[in-house]
Every structure is written in structure tokens, then in C-alpha cells.
Amino acid sequence: MAGLGSPDTVTLFHQEPSGVTYRIPALLYIEQPAIFLAFAEKRLTPDDQDAQYLVMRRGLQKRGTVQWENITAVRHAKLPGHRTMNPCPLYDASTDTVFLFFICVRTNVSERFQILTGRNASRLCFVTSRDHGRSWSPPTDVTKEVLGDDLKNCATLAVGPGHGIQSPSGKLIVPAYLFYIHSRVCGLPVPWKIQSHSFLFCSDDHGKSWHKGSVLWKQPTGECEVAEVASGNGPGLLYCSARTSRHYRVEATSSLQFLEFGDSRYCRSLCEPPHGCQGSVVSYQPIDAGTGTDANDGSEESCLHTNVLSWLLYSHPTSNRKRVDLGIYLNKSPLDQSSWSPPWVINRGPSGYSDLAVCQGAHAFGCLFECGACACEKIVFRIFTVEELAEHLPEP
């Protein structure tokens, strides 16, 4: 067991002298029995093509601290002749089952090669655990089931990375993205007409079957995460935050029932470094959440704005020039993109991918993120409370 290195942080994965590197953090929290599951890719080098398989650590929360077990390999999360990438866990509370999604990419085939040729070498798979990560099922490949007819126009695809969610109705929702072939000449894909688009896929029967939801077609978007925005007026909305290479994040909302996104838009409050970076978003319901008392004009949109019960938290590098200074942003009015707070910087210096988890019962949050002398030197876990967040967030 490894305890916390300080009251709130601990390094879970660290680059080895041999060059072995751990990248792409994903974090899941289960309320009962109060356990964190932290995932990452093990790579021979920092390069994407040198990914090998997924690893994990289990963190048991006891008396305000988290005790971490040693690193273990998720050996079942693999297909022969493929490398495993992009961990994306979610928890089905109805069946007490952890789903771990990932992609398996044919060995020695790069993402760039797939995009240039339009020949997909990536498979969308998952494994499950019914004992909170101690053991895992054999892999299930759902590539064709999820993409359907879109598979023939898919140059490559990926899931997450980060985490998926379960809606109040029990629907399991997983974020993903694909490089779509928009144009062909003489049957061959036009490389500059292949664009990345975020999408969701889901299950309404606890993982027995999966189907694709809406795609963000309006802008080129990539890695994304989603969070529920609860409403006092009834069914809430699904909020999506997506990576772009256009200086700002893209936001979109959808009904939880149909997963059909309306008008996606750039959020001027949330910047992107050059080429973008993955970010994480979660929904939190504060203790004093009410049904909204502000005046409204009676419209459906106005009523939803004034009856929102959720806050959104978002983690991402705060610089628009490079991947540095990981920050936590807060939005108490999630349907208003101008309501994002300035960030509380929780890591100064090189910072990369991150993933958030909500400990709703403890009114606390976990954050698993890349940092170090370079952004891929180590993956660190930090836990903080709502009170700490309020104390450290800068004034608007």
C-alpha cells in the first residue's frame, strides 16, 4: 500500500529509467465502498505508437485519506497484434459493474497513416469488472455495433479518454471521436477532407447492446467528455466539452433521452493551447441546490436556466500557448458559457491530460493529471474539497 505523499497529492505513475512512460490518465470513483480506480497506458516511450497495454491502481478511501494499492496490468484489455490505448471507465450503479472502454490499434500502424489512407486500424472494445477492478472479463469488440454504416467512412476512431457516465435513467454514456471521410475521388478518400468529430454512444440495457448517438458535425472536434446538468423542472441535459485546434473549446448540449446535440459553439472562456489538449468535465450538485428562484420569462430555456441544480467543474491547461499550469474551472450556471470562473491553478509548470471524479457524498473531488519536468514524466492524483475550491478560485 502507498499512502498520500502529502495531505492531498500522490504520484501514482512515474516514468522509469528505461524510458517506460505512463500516459493518458482516467479516473473513476465508486461511492460504495469508497474506492478510486486510476488507469493509464504503459508505453515503451512517450510516443503513441509505443503504447503497450493498460495499467491501474486501486485507491481505498479511509478516514479522509486514500491508500493506493500497487500497479497492476489490465491484461484482458487487449487484442492479439494490437496495442491498447485510451482508457475510459464508467460505473453502472444498477448492476455494480465497472466498464472499461479502450481502443486496440494494430501494431506499428500510426493514427496519421490511418488518416492519410482512410484505412481504419482501430477497434473499439471494453472489459468489465464485478469486483471493483480486482478482476476483468475477456474483451468485447463493439466497433461495428456502435458505428454501423458510418464504419465505411471512418478513417480511425478512439474513445474518451477520461470517463463515461450513467444518467439518472440508467443509460450508460461513453464519449468518443472519429476521423470521418467527407469526400472520395474515384473511390479513394481525399485526405484533407477527413475531419475529426466528437460523438457519444450509449446503452439502455446495462451494456448488453450499444448504439451511436449524436455527432458534433459543425466544427472539427476530438477528445471529449460529458456531464449531466440536472434541472428542477424534470429531465436534465447532457453537456459536452470537446477538444479543438482552434484556440477554444467547443461546447454542446443535448437531451439525456435522445443524445441529439443542437448547436455546438466555441467557448471564449476556455482556451486551448496550439493543437489542443484533452480536458475533463464533471457535474456536482451542491448541498444547498434548490429549484431556482430567479425571475424568468416563462420560456422553456429560461425556466431551465433558473432551475439548474448542478455545477460543472472542468480541468485543463490554462495557457493558450503551451501545455502548462493545469487549472480547475467552475461554472455555477452551466448553460451560460460566460459564467466560467477564472481557473484555480493546481499545478504550475508542464501539465497535460487530466481526469476529474466527484465524491458527491463527501463533497470532494479527485483529479488525476500528467505533469513533471515534462508533461509526461508522471501522473499525479490530487483530492480537494468544495471548501478548498471556493477558497482558491480567483474572483471574476
Image: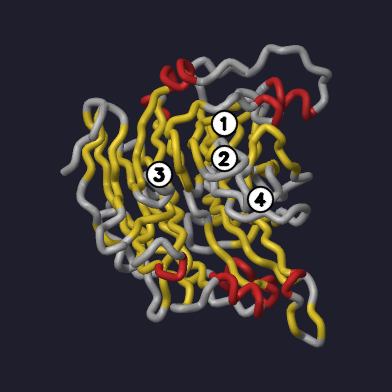
Amino acid identity at mark 2: Ala
Q: Is label 4 in a helix, a strand or a loop?
A: loop
Closer to the chain start, of discs 3 and 1, is 1
Q: Which residue is mark 1?
A: 312
CA gap, disc 2 and disc 4: 18 Å
Kindly identify which numbered label has been placed on residue 102: none
Residue at 55% x, 63% y is 158
Asked whether, in this view, residue 293 is left or right of residue 187, the answer is left
The three-letter amino acid code for the residue at tag 4 is Thr
User: Residue most toward the left?
Assistant: 1
Crowd around label 1: few <14 · some 14–19 · many ≥20 (10 Å): many
Precedes in sequence: disc 1 or disc 2: 2
Q: Nearer the viewer, residue 345 or 290?
A: 345
Mark 1 or mark 4, earlier in chain: 4
- The residue singled out by tag 4 in the image is 244
Dots 1, 4 in contact, CB < 8 A = no
Residue 68 location in percent, x, y?
23, 43
Pick whichever of labels 2 and 4 is earlier in the sequence.
2
Amino acid type at image mark 1: Leu
Residue 308 position in % (x across, y down): 64, 25
Which kind of residue does numbered mark 3 sit on?
Answer: Cys
| Residue 200 drawn at (x, y percent) | 61, 55
Please give the residue where the numbered disc 3 appears in the rendered image. 371
Residue appearing at x 55%, y 30% in the figure: 329
Q: Report helix, strand or loop for mark 2.
A: strand
